Image (tube, helix red, strand yellow):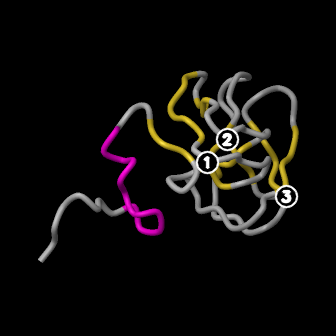
Amino acid sequence: MKRCLQVCLEDNVATILEDAAEETVEIVGLPERRSVSLHGSIPMGHKVAIGRIAAGAAIVKYGVRIGMATADIATGEWVHLHNCRSLVDERSNSFDVATGAATDTPYE
């Protein structure tokens, strides 16, 4: 079974440890082992919601508010630029969802 890492009990997201498809992944990092069913593919290193997150609610990772949900996020859903905005790096709020490329810099 593939895994994702939850660092703090307060976290509402976990980090996918290897590319995962629509499947169940084990949540590791805390004494209590649980799992979450993914609602689609999530790339390694990206976040998955390990509980429902309402629009406007904080995204919590490492026990710290790192962002805010811009839409309702279901348990098992990919948490990324399309459904949250950063509270840490305002520039990242304008990155392309698919590539992560900056959209505020013209390339020729």
Dot 1, how many residues are within 10 Å of its Cα: few (below 14), some (14-19), or many (20+)? many
Please provide the residue range marked out in magenta.
Answer: 90-100
Q: Which residue is mark 1?
A: 47
Dot 3, how many residues are within 10 Å of its Cα: few (below 14), some (14-19), or many (20+)? some
User: Given contact means CB atoms under 8 Å apart, are the residues at marks 2 and 1 in contact?
Assistant: yes
Q: Amino acid at mark 2?
A: Ala
| Along the viewing direction, whichever of 106 and 46 lies nearer the viewer | 106
Q: Which residue is mark 2?
A: 14
Marks 2 and 1, the one that precedes in the sequence: 2
Disc 3 on helix, strand or loop? Answer: strand
- Identified at 58% across, 58% down, the residue is 44
Q: Amino acid at mark 1?
A: Lys
Q: CA distance from mark 3 to mark 2?
A: 13 Å
Quadrant in which the C terminus is drawn? bottom left
Q: Position of residue 103 (x, y in %)?
A: 29, 62
Quadrant in which the N terminus is drawn? bottom right
92 is within the stretch colored magenta: yes
Marks 3 and 2, the one that precedes in the sequence: 2
Is residue 105 shown above or below 3? below
User: Given contact means CB atoms under 8 Å apart, are the residues at marks 3 and 2 in contact?
Assistant: no
Q: Position of residue 52 (x, y in %)?
A: 78, 40
Q: Which residue is mark 3?
A: 24
